[in-house]
Amino acid sequence: MGLTGLGIAALYAGDATRAWDTPWYAGLPVLCAGLVLAGAAGWIGHRARRRRADRAASSDSSGAPASTSGSHAIR
């Protein structure tokens, strides 16, 4: 989102210095694209963290119950 804000600021700063002519609505598509990209990055990051946590939990056997019957019983 910070890069989106900087992009919009640069867009209107160029207009303010008369380097180019920017219509008033030009910032809206940039803002929408930035929000979509920020949401996608957050979703991807969340999924990656969740997969890593699930993988770590499945490889950890500390919560597994011990066998107390049959030929594998601990004596």
Image (cartoon, rainbow, N blue to C red):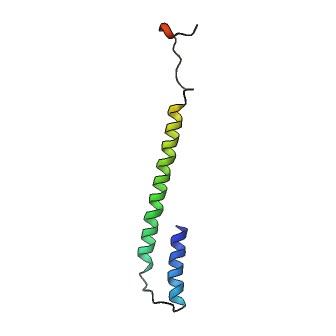
In the rendered structure, the answer to whether residue 43 lies left or right of residue 75 reads left
Q: Residue at x 44, y 58 (%)?
A: 40
Q: Position of residue 20 (x, y in %)?
A: 47, 89
Q: Position of residue 48 (x, y in %)?
A: 49, 48
Q: Is residue 4 above or below residue 25?
A: above
Q: Is residue 27 above or below residue 66?
A: below
Q: Residue at x 55, y 91 (%)?
A: 17
Q: Is residue 36 above or below residue 45?
A: below
Q: Residue at x 55, y 26 (%)?
A: 63
Work out which quarter of the rendered image holds the C terminus and state it. Answer: top right
Q: Position of residue 28 (x, y in %)?
A: 42, 76
Residue 60 figure quarter: top right
- Of all residues shown, which one is farthest toward the bottom? 18
Q: Position of residue 43 (x, y in %)?
A: 46, 54
> How many marks overall?
0
Q: Residue at x 53, y 79 (%)?
A: 9
